[in-house]
Image (spheres, grey):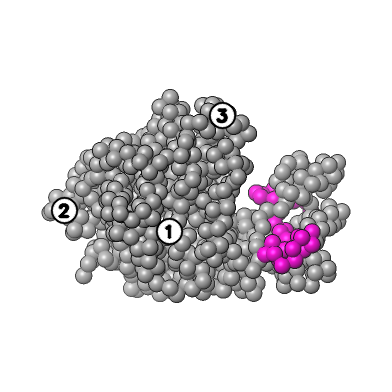
Amino acid sequence: YRAFAGSGGFGPATPRDPQRQMQVKWGAWQRRNRFGGEFQLSGHSGEAFNTKYRKELEEHPEYRALVKGERAAWWLAVKFCVSNPTVLQMYIDDRVATYRQARKLDPTSPRSWAVSVEPADGGGHCECAECAKLGTVSDRVFHVANLVARAVRQEFPDGHVSLFAYNEHAMVPSIAIEPNVYVAVIPYAFQRTELAPEQLIDAWGKKVPQMAIYDYWSIPDWSHDAPSFDPLVAGPAKLRSWHRRGVNGFLNESTFSGGAMGLAWWLSAKLAWDPAQDVEQLFQQYLREAFGAGAPALERMYRRWSVGYWPTSHELALSFRDVDEAWRLVETDPACAARVADVARYVEYLRLLYAYDTTKFRSEERYHAAEALGDYGWSIYDSAMVHAFRHGQLLARDESRTHAEILQRYDTKNPAAPGWAASSQLTDEQVRARLSAGLKQLAPQDFVVRRYSGKLRPVSPSLPQSASQFAPEFWPSSTQTIDLNIPPGRKSVTLKLAIEQPVRLTLLDANGSVVKNTTLTGTAEGLKHWQEVTINTAEPGAYQLLLWSPKRTFGLQMPLDVPHSLPGWTNSQGRPTPRLHFYVPQSIERVAIYARYIAAGPPKFFDPAGKEVTPMFVDEGRLMLIDIPESQRGQVWSLDKAKCPIEFLQMLNVPGSFAFSAEALLVPEDAIGK
């Protein structure tokens, strides 16, 4: 089973698409690229059950989950009390009846392979004493799944039920699972276990003979259809990992944006059938067959986006230049020119998204930028370059609090709404004019984005000898990964932690195997109390430490006598970072850094001698550029008092590895050379 779907779907018929042809186009594209499968998974079914039996649930509070000592009020995502025999039988009968109807309509359809028994979304599971006797939340959810599975099998020996391993029931249950229960694991987000994603997949692989994965690949709710997914490295790596682990299906929540994910899904369609195929050869085939003579120019753009797309005037300028060059090279090839024109439509969308994103919140300027962005999204609707329906919903959601008229601009129930008349489909000539205007407006900076790889190596040949020295306090937002290199002769590492809510600690060796997995709890003093935590490693070498506390900050002090690096971080908004050190390779003349820091201002930067250096600020400070004198290249620089609570501070052309001292810093070996 191989499938993806855009968040929010295609929406109802609109004046822009009265026959809903966009859904037809995407369906045809998916079939031609062999998406689909022998079976089809459904999502949450609890909401449908609640709606159907609302009267009964409202009249019988004992049917509803007991949460914090009270029976939950009826609402769409309320859970039922799984130990109540009456409502439990109602649910079993409802699921069997739903499955029976599907089989009656078409017994050979992938939809009739299984019926969903996934609870309503979110938390709120019953906490009554009788439910507690059934075990953990996972035990209870899969207990219900088992009951439905047996009932389905009695009537349909080849029938199945399906559900997610997700949220509070992501963990493998302690009970046995019926053979006709099919599980789709959601390992990379919204899972509350003490396991890293691959560990959770492996744990489920030991429990069930086959399973699917549900993942999130560039959903518009998070990325607004900007490039946010690596189709050349990350996507293939996941598909191959799933294949090795025996996964036989995937359902990925994504976007119906050809601009953001067209290449990624085309490559994934090939690899989903044969993960051993060469990604580079497939990439070249895509470029050659889609863009003809314009392929080299767009290859540059897609490779940059694969490393990482950051919304800066620099990246927009390069993208506009690449598309302009490609378009000029294919002017005598109408089919390739049409495809390049669609890519031009998409990069103009990125320019308007950037313009909107850099306006002041709740300002009149922001309203006009939102209006222009919404109009443009619908004006390129026919190209499928942007998931226009979902993007319009998100834009209205974000702006309607201060600009209520945004909600009415594209009212799907009102053909006379002003937006429909304002967004006629752009012609290629109009797109070319916008491209020319962008070329005049945007100018690139003097740097090249780089990705570094290879084993982590220490920059310094020696470390401080004292094992009693700890770094100043560092406060991650809720999670932190730390790469360690335990020196010869050492068999442990000791950290200091300040904990308010439980912190999960997982130590992995160089092969990704779990060395230690535990949950640390705080004291009555909470974040005011520092406790030492010693982790036994047994052997020297490379390790990775994962610290995670759901949506809660915690304090960390690293020992300075152990080589380490933080491969990115977000920190608690009220607590800026201490001094963090990073490496500038010998070949780098200008360091480029992207950050969306808070109003308190950017970090302070220091050269290897400790002298403060003021960057050049571009794009209202989101892009910071530091010219590196030749004598200070190939050395360790530092930053201080950074506040990045939402997303990583991105090092665009130097390694994104940070340490609490210059001597302890680890960086990828290709940044240092021999």
Residue that mark 1 sits on? 263
| Mark 2 closeness class: few <14, some 14–19, many ≥20 residues within 10 Å | some
Which mark is in front, 1 or 2? 1
The stretch of residues the image draws in magenta is: 101-130
Secondary element type, mark 2: helix
**Where is residue 627 shown, x and y percent of the image?**
18, 47
Residues 165 and 332: in front is 332
Please state if 306 lies on the left or on the right of 514 as rendered: left
> Mark 3 is on which residue type?
Ala
How far, Cα to Cα, is label 1 from label 2?
Answer: 40 Å
What residue do we see at 79% from left, 59% from top? Answer: 101
Please give the residue where the numbered disc 2 appears in the rendered image: 632
Residue 117: within the magenta? Answer: yes
For mark 3, what is the residue?
Answer: 417
Q: For the point 80% across and 69% down, which residue is it?
A: 156
Residue positioned 64% across, 68% down in the render: 38
- Disc on the earlier residue, 3 or 1: 1
Q: Are marks 3 and 2 in contact (CB under 8 Å)?
A: no
The number of callouts visible is: 3
Q: Is residue 123 left or right of residue 573?
A: right
Answer with mark 1 or mark 2, whichever residue precedes in sequence: 1
Q: Amino acid at mark 2?
A: Gln
What's the CA distance linking mark 3 and mark 2?
Answer: 60 Å
Measured as percent of width and height from the top left, residue 655 is found at 30, 57
Point out the image quarter for the C terminus: bottom left
Res 401 → quadrant: top right
What is the number of the mark on residue 495? none
